[in-house]
Amino acid sequence: MIRFLKMTGLIFLFLAIYYVSQVLSSMIFGLAYGIRIGIESAKTGTMENSSNITEELTSFISGNMSLILVLAILLSLILYYIVFKIKKTSIKDYFLSSRISVKNLIVIFILGISLNITIGYILSFISEISVLKGLFDKYDMVSKQIFGGDNFILTFLVIGLIVPVFEEILFRGLVFGELKKSLSKYVALVLQAVVFGVYHMNVVQGIYACLIGLLIGFVYLKSKSIFGAILLHISINATAVVFSQTHVQNFVEKNSIFYLIISLLLSVVMLTMFVKDKQNEKYIPI
């Protein structure tokens, strides 16, 4: 019982640190915006309408979401370092970091791209169901905040690269690692995926994040490498950023059924190749 409580407490702590770091980062940016408005008001001698300030503040935070996430990640990593210093343990003890074959790296990368396209199409079809319109309106709003930044390069670097690396450290490393200490690896696999989905705090995003978390967790266990999980997450997120900020999405949507079938088949083929791979190829050291 004590072991279970300790495990639950540590997982809650890891997640709470990231959540609080995001809140603090948003507050810092909000404060910076408030100071700027105050200075401008002092110069002009006029005060903006409170409703306008609220809308502009929301827009400002939304437009700087990538920078807010970077700050939150930095704060989280510092706090994780302090936690592990206090525990007198190493964060490396939580990770599987075996060597992974070049072939598997390529398969994982292609799997992530095809999987993202497949999920995008499925969500597009489901969103047309009138009963679910409300849920998808909220999901679309969140997606625009995350993937729709004005600076493509910054959004790609943060959402496509930095966030996946950090989230794999958190969810597949710390959370999954803690669960595996007290539970069977298969129970831990399912639970870490549920935690990953719930943490997104959006019904639509949470459901498919749970499924993706299950797949990433499986890749992590099968490859015995956090780098395989990171690469899969990067390929999924990076594809989402590219599609959301270019005309590729519009081009593909013209033949949606055709491309859905292609992406679905490619996902199945890549996953099958990964599962059946016996890791007999030459490895690259990690």
Image: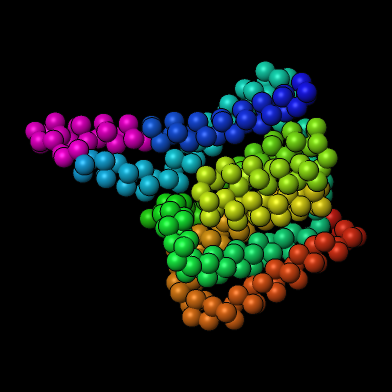
Q: Where is residue 127 in the image (x, y as percent from the top left)?
A: 49, 65
State which region is magenta. Answer: 29-50
Q: Position of residue 135 (x, y in %)?
A: 46, 56
Q: In this view, does 144 lie to the left or right of 33?
A: right
* Residue displayed at 45% across by 46% down: 66
**Predominant secondary structure, magenta span:** helix
Magenta-colored stretch includes residue 38: yes
Quadrant of res 282: bottom right
Does residue 50 sit above or below 130 in this rendering?
Answer: above
Magenta-colored stretch includes residue 255: no
Q: Which colour scheme is used?
A: rainbow
47 vs 75, nearest the viewer:
47
157 vs 126, nearest the viewer:
126
Q: Position of residue 213 (x, y in %)?
A: 67, 50
* Residue displayed at 73% across by 19% down: 88
Does residue 131 sit above or below 172 in this rendering?
Answer: below
The answer to whether residue 137 is visible is yes
Q: In this view, does 76 lie to the left or right of 173?
A: left
The quadrant of the picture occupied by the N terminus is top right
The answer to whether residue 97 is visible is no
- Which residue occupies the extreme front position in the image? 131
Q: Is residue 57 left or right of residue 20?
A: left
Quadrant of res 130: bottom left
Q: Position of residue 161 (x, y in %)?
A: 57, 51
* Residue displayed at 61% across by 28% down: 13
